[in-house]
Image (spheres, helix red, strand yellow):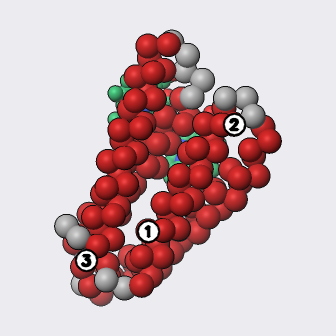
Amino acid sequence: MQGVARNFFTLAIIYSLCGMALGIHMAISQDHGQMPTHAHTMVAGWLMSAVFAFFYHLFPAVAHKRLAAIHFWLTAISGIGLLIGLYILLAGNPAIEPLLGISSLAFYAGMLLFAFIALPAIWRS
Ligand code: HEM
Ligand code: HEM
């Protein structure tokens, strides 16, 4: 695994470690207030990044294109903004909502870009 695929898989592992640590903290403290942060870190973070990693691993020709690198950085920055923003919001700081809104839209834009990258690749092959 190399390039964008390796970047996505590294990001996925980081999400899994942070998300599971938060899950353990929630379980021990019996305070599930951060459940949406944990859930999104695990599924929108760990699982989605791992899917992107294996997609780019399977389609190396697409992975080498500039658009794939843009997809990685857009997804990584918006995803981290989304999760940190959500954590801060659920810790009782509603002022963070604009960051959450912008990050959500950017995360969605990343998924649109992935559709644009991935669909032609799978239909061509
Ligand atoms: C160290 C391992 C983990 C611990 C200690 C843990 C702990 C928790 C806790 C305490 C909750 C809150 C449950 C509730 O309030 O109803 C939760 C929810 C959740 N967890 Fe984990 N979790 C772990 C691993 C994972 C993994 C590996 C995934 C997915 C890949 C995951 C996905 C979710 C999801 C999606 C929810 C929300 C479920 C719902 O909507 O009711 N968790 N977890
Ligand atoms: C643009 C990004 C996203 C936004 C703004 C968003 C927003 C939300 C909201 C508002 C909820 C309800 C939370 C609650 O009732 O407490 C939710 C729940 C959930 N979302 Fe997302 N979501 C996003 C992306 C995703 C993605 C990409 C996945 C999966 C790959 C996902 C998986 C889930 C799951 C499993 C739940 C139920 C667990 C929970 O209540 O936290 N979400 N999401």
- Report ligand 2 position as a quadrant: top right
* Residue at 48% from the left image edge and 20% from the top image edge: 26
Q: Is residue 35 above or below residue 111?
A: above
> Where does the C terminus fall, quadrant-wise?
bottom left
The mark that comes first in sequence, 2 or 3, is: 3
Q: Is residue 115 above or below residue 108?
A: below
As rendered, which of 34 and 111 lies closer to the eye?
34
Cα separation between marks 2 and 1: 25 Å
The mark that comes first in sequence, 1 or 3, is: 3
As rendered, which of 41 and 3 lies closer to the eye?
3
Task: Return the mark for residue 59.
Answer: 3
> Where does the N terminus fall, quadrant-wise?
bottom left
Query: What's the amino acid at mark 2?
Result: Leu
Task: Return the mark for residue 72.
Answer: 1
Label 2: which secondary element: helix
Query: What's the amino acid at mark 3?
Result: Phe
Give the image quarter of residue 62.
bottom left
Image position, residue 27 (x, y; %): 44, 17
Q: Which residue is mark 2?
A: 89
* Residue at 64% from the left image edge and 44% from the top image edge: 85
Label 1: which secondary element: helix
* Residue at 55% from the left image edge and 21% from the top image edge: 32
The mark that comes first in sequence, 2 or 1, is: 1
Query: Viewer-nearest of labels 2 and 3?
Result: 2
Query: Does the residue at mark 2 contact the one at mark 1 (Cβ under 8 Å)?
Result: no
